[in-house]
Image (cartoon, rainbow, N blue to C red):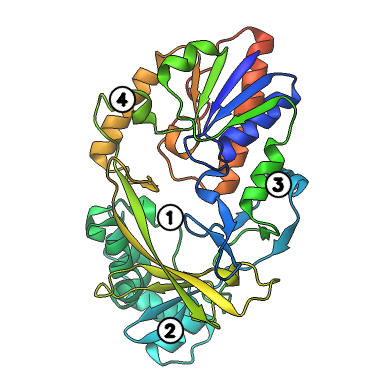
């Protein structure tokens, strides 16, 4: 079979590799000049620091198969994401932990004391949180909410946290110990030579042809036995139902002679500071030595027609529009929609790879049984 992948990020690369190893011919299109999608990394020309061009990506997972999979194609170095936050001129650890609590409230509480202390500040009148704001108030109370969540979230999403769904704040946003590891997952690390080299390794197969700087046109669908589309779902249908809402990011690059902030990620919780965070990229590769440093201030805003979409908004209007696009997709023969853009969901890298593996295996099972592959192996809703 001759199969097509639209997009050379993790979704297209992993599905393409799995199907190429099953003896299918695979052609991968990407409109950009590079593979790896928004995970693309390259050496900064001035400092030679490995930079995450579209913002930092830290690999973390509890999925053993996914961890083994990426380690087939790259050596991973240990990396622990220790995020800091500047609030009202002081620096704190994130996620909110026992150190943060004691520093913020000028206390020296033990874990059980801190738990009772925060419990007394939490708003227990909120039984079923209906918004991000209510979710935060229910768990941490107003002081921590306004310091670490309110301003940052308002800048990130462009609206008041009271207008955002509670699901954005998925888990209890406080730890009653001194663990400042931002992630909970068992496996955490960075590919030694960057994500671009990792994806290039996945794509290195004789049955795979990659065509960069080549946008995929819907009229090309008929040239292939099946298409796996990881581009924007609404874009495939020429935005006939309207544009799905996204947030995008602007990056302001600057160079520093030495170490600028002493950590990879510094959030800025104050609403008066226009950017959400500063990332210092040499700290994402701590096994390397660089005197100079390249940093980026990140600004979040609404995504326009010519911007790179980063975070799906998924408010009520978008979900209604998504449902209409899903119906169109399900009536489209020979196309499966995958990945962050194709299913209009925010996906971590490990989940993207897991779903890509499952999609490839599901497709092969459909071929063996004579069933028609579905438009979505994972329902976007």
From mark 4 to mark 3, how far is it between C-alphas?
34 Å
From mark 4 to mark 1, how far is it between C-alphas?
33 Å
Location of mark 2 (residue): 91
> Where does the N terminus fall, quadrant-wise?
top right
Total tally of numbered discs in the picture: 4
- The mark nearer the N terminus, 4 or 1, is 1
From mark 2 to mark 4, how far is it between C-alphas?
46 Å
Q: Residue at x 43, y 92 (%)?
A: 107
For residue 239, side relative to residue 217 (left or right): left
Residue 17, compared with residue 133, is above or below; it is above
- The mark nearer the N terminus, 3 or 2, is 3
> Are the residues tagged 4 and 1 within 8 Å (C-beta)?
no
Which x, y percent locates residue 12?
58, 33
Query: In terms of secondary structure, where does tag 1 sit?
Result: loop
Which of discs 2 and 4 lies nearer the camera? The answer is 4
Which x, y percent locates residue 130?
27, 52
From mark 1 to mark 3, how far is it between C-alphas?
26 Å
For residue 17, side relative to residue 126 (left or right): right
Query: In terms of secondary structure, where does tag 2 sit?
Result: strand
Disc sitting over residue 238 in the figure: 4
Which of discs 1 and 2 lies nearer the camera? The answer is 2
Q: Residue at x 51, y 18 (%)?
A: 374
Q: Is residue 297 visible?
A: yes
Which of discs 3 and 2 lies nearer the camera? The answer is 3
Which x, y percent locates residue 268?
36, 74
Disc sitting over residue 170 in the figure: 1
Disc sitting over residue 70 in the figure: 3
């Amino acid at each position: 079979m001759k199969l097509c992948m639209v997009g050379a990020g993790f979704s297209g690369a992993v599905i393409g590799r799995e199907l190429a190893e099953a003896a299918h011919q695979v052609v991968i299109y990407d409109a950009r000049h590079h593979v790896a999608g928004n995970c693309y990394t390259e050496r900064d020309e001035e400092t030679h620091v490995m930079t995450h061009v579209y913002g930092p990506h830290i690999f973390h997972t509890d999925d053993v198969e996914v961890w083994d999979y990426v380690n087939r194609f790259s050596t991973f170095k240990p990396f622990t994401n220790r995020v800091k936050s500047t609030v009202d001129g002081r620096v704190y650890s994130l996620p909110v932990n026992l150190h943060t609590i004691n520093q913020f409230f000028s206390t020296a509480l033990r874990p059980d004391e801190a738990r009772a202390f925060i419990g007394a500040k939490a708003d227990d009148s909120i039984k079923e949180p209906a918004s991000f704001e209510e979710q935060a108030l229910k768990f941490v109370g107003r002081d921590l909410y306004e310091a670490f969540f309110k301003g940052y979230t308002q800048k990130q999403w462009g609206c008041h946290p009271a207008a955002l769904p509670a699901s954005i704040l998925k888990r209890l946003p406080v730890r009653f110990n001194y663990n400042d590891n931002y992630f909970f997952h068992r496996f955490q690390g960075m590919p030694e030579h960057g994500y671009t080299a990792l994806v290039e390794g996945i794509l290195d197969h004789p049955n795979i042809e990659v065509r960069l700087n080549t946008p995929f046109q819907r009229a090309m669908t008929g040239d292939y036995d099946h298409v796996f589309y990881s581009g924007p779902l609404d874009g495939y249908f020429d935005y006939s139902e309207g544009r799905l809402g996204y947030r995008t990011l602007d990056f302001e690059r600057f160079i520093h002679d030495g170490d600028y902030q002493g950590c990879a990620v510094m959030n800025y919780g104050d609403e008066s500071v226009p950017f959400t965070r500063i990332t210092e990229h040499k700290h994402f590769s701590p096994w390397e030595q660089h005197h100079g440093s390249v940093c980026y201030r990140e600004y979040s805003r609404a995504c326009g027609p010519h911007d790179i979409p980063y975070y799906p908004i998924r408010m009520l209007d978008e979900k209604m529009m998504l449902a209409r696009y899903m119906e169109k997709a399900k009536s489209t023969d020979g196309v499966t929609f995958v990945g962050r853009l194709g299913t209009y969901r925010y996906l971590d890298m490990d989940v993207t790879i897991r779903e890509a593996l499952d999609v490839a295996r599901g497709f092969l099972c459909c071929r063996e049984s004579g069933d028609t592959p579905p438009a979505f192996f994972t329902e976007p809703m």
